[in-house]
Amino acid sequence: MCHMVRRRKKTSIIALFITFGIIVFLADHGDMLFNHNMVAKRLMYEESARVPLIFAGRSILERKESIDRSKLASLADVMPTLLSLCDIDIPGTVEGIPLFTEKRHEYLYGEVSEGEKATRMIRDRDYKLIYYPCGNIFQLFDMKTDRKEMHDLASDS
């Protein structure tokens, strides 16, 4: 991540690492890589919507026993998580949550594009609903029993 930050900001990121020993590995999207016979990043299947998010370092190790890896997380959670790990107050306007606390998302909402290329998704711990406005198509998946999203419950009815 440091290589994408302007030079004047690199110093603060390096200082953050030295002081708190936090490393974050993340991406903004996945890729289908021929899963579901598709190659794309603009879909709401897990391979595209679920992206790497790894926190490492001394302050993470101190909390490892209490980490809930089943939590729903979004990129909006990265900043409040880093602030929390550094004992910095989180501004009230922040929409994300610090991931290493008891707080959790009841659901996550995602959207890509507009018009004919639009895709919408809402996901909770158990289910994911995908909506394609073009064609008014819905897909519903049980994420506990069908992690690869192969059985569309919406098409059953």
Image (spheres, rainbow, N blue to C red):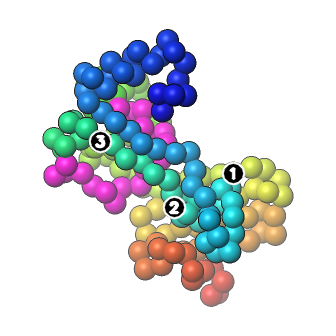
Q: Decide: marks 3, 2 in contact (CB < 8 A)?
A: no
Element at label 2: strand
Residue 35, image quadrant: bottom right
Inspect this view and state whether residue 120 appears. Answer: no
Q: Amino acid at mark 3?
A: Ala
Please name whichever residue, 39 or 155, is drawn nearer the observer in this view of the structure.
39
At which x and y percent is residue 13? Answer: 39, 22
Q: From mark 3 to mark 1, how far is it between C-alphas?
A: 30 Å
Please name whichever residue, 7 or 29, is drawn nearer the observer in this view of the structure.
7
Inspect this view and state whether residue 14 appears. Answer: yes
Q: Residue 47 magenta-drawn?
A: no
Element at label 1: strand
At which x and y percent is residue 6? Answer: 55, 18
Q: Residue 69 magenta-drawn?
A: yes
Looking at the image, the residue that sits furthest to the bottom is 156
Up-down: is 157 above or below 95?
below
10 Å crowding of disc 3: few (<14), some (14-19), many (20+): few
User: What quarter of the picture does the C terminus occupy?
Assistant: bottom right
Q: Nearer the viewer, mark 1 or mark 2?
A: 1
> Looking at the image, which residue is at 51% across and 75% down?
148
Give me the disc on residue 56. 3
Looking at the image, the residue that sits furthest to the top is 8
Give me the disc on residue 112. 1
Q: Decide: marks 3, 1 in contact (CB < 8 A)?
A: no
Q: Amino acid at mark 1?
A: Val
Please name whichever residue, 119 or 58, is drawn nearer the observer in this view of the structure.
58
Mark 3 or 1, nearer chain start: 3
Mark 2 lies on residue: 123
Over which residues does the magenta segment extend?
64-82
> Looking at the image, which residue is at 21% across and 36% down?
59
